[in-house]
Image: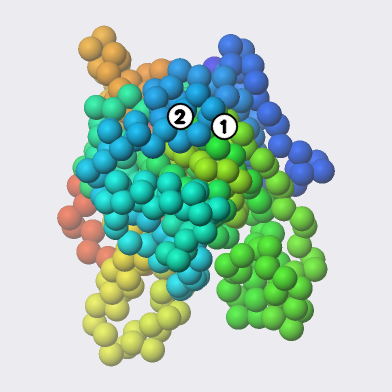
Amino acid sequence: MDRATFACSTAFFRDYSSSSAQGTFSLPAGHVDFIDKVDSFTYSDFFRDYLIPNHPCVFSEKFTDGWGSRRHWVTWDGKPDFDHLLQEFGDAVVPVANCDVKEYNSNPKEQLPFKEYISYWKEYIKNGYHSSRGCLYLKDWHLSRAFPEQDVYTTPVYFSSDWLNEYWDAVAVDDYRFVYMGPKGSWTPFHADVFRSYSWSANICGRKKWLLYPPGQEDYLKDNHGNLPFDVTSPGLQDRSVYPRYNQSQPPVEIVQEAGEIVFIPSGWHHQVYNLEDTISINHNWVNGCNVALMWCFLQDELAAVQREINEWKDPMDDWHLQCQLIMKSCTGIDYKEFYNFLKVIAENRISILENGLDDEASAKNTPKAAISTLGMLHAVFDLKRTVKVLTSLSANEDFRKLDLTSLSPPPEALLHHLKAAIDTALL
């Protein structure tokens, strides 16, 4: 991050609240920028023009040319190389969704041997893209975690400020890096990404169609019970007795993503995605200083929804507030205390860089500290300033303060003091 971008980002987040500033814009005529200049497009360009304003964009296939998956997973004519994939991953067990079945507003999943899924896929193509088993879609496969030695891809620098995976790698519990593989016609229903995170999706082969709705547009798509649609292309949305505000919604931003291209999906943008051909893609969800406040707003909304749902048990249940946290974590994957630890890990990594620098051995490795160093010291300061903003709000939150915080180390007040001191020292 250069000084001009640091000044721009600091001014933006000083003058506007994250929730309002990132949710009230529109793109001119649904235009989405196509980025083709791999040699001249900088991280600061992306940060300033897309991360801060929360705008989508598409990167050309030039940005993925060197990836191992593009060289080895694809046949000469651009199709999935089933033989190679079976050779490398045949014994894996993978999560597979049935696109033809709706269950609790999503597609039900099962675990299948990868070799069985590839056999199904081949047969599905042979039968004209039909099967008595339905349209099966391999989704949310943690391939990089299961096969760390594989040369699959390198995360582009534009997406390297990735707090989600930095934290979950540190606690060795989970990650938000996925591989998707599916036949022509497979699709993902209408949704916004986990924690209202950013996402990037790179097509290794095949084509996708994306329907994107900016933050706020989803409100016009809700039915009279406040539920979002499963399929935004369904004719049922025209029924005003069920979807009373649908006619006030704007048409979606539509993107057709070609092989090798990367789509950047901004925070809080609801979307629906179709595979127009047999397609393999790599996807990351990620949070950073630009959208961590939106993650915090999302968690507060999720907790409020849980509290409304079990409000009748508030008086007779001694640990009602704790139970609300447990339910929220089971639904979202995180509660308020873990969110504190999430902020702490991110902050401590930045402080370590500011106070100690980075030795040559660490910089050569693919580690969070190496990524922070690549982005520069000013980026570490920006991250700390955003962490202080959200941590201050969390520490003052009534529901957070009702929890037993004695297990948190350091205590929130001490961590805040340390962060502010580190920022002041760095800016001297």
Give the position of the C terminus as an image quadrant.
Answer: top left
Q: Is disc 1 surrounded by few (<14), some (14 to 19) or many (20+) residues within 10 Å? A: many
Is 107 on the left or on the right of 144, as rendered?
Answer: right
- State yes or no: discs 1 and 2 in contact (Cβ < 8 Å): yes
Residue position for label 1 = 259
Foreground residue, 213 or 334? 213
Closer to us: 425 or 156? 156
Label 1 sits on what residue type?
Ala
In this rendering, the answer to whether 129 lies above or below 76 is below
> SS of the residue at dot 2?
loop
In the image, residue 101 sits, relative to residue 292, either above or below, namely below
Horizontal and vertical percent position of residue 397: 41, 61
Residue 128, how many percent across, how many down? 55, 53
The residue sitting at 68% across, 63% down in the picture is 233
Inspect the image, locate mark 2, and give the three-letter code of the amino acid beneath it.
Answer: Val
Left-right relation of 317 to 132: left
Q: Quadrant of residue 260?
A: top right
In the rendered image, which residue does mark 2 sit on? 74
Residue drawn where x is 65% and y is 25% of the image = 35
Q: In this orientation, which residue lies closer to the viewer: 187 or 399?
A: 187
Check residue 278 in the rendering and tell me which mark sits there, or answer none. Answer: none
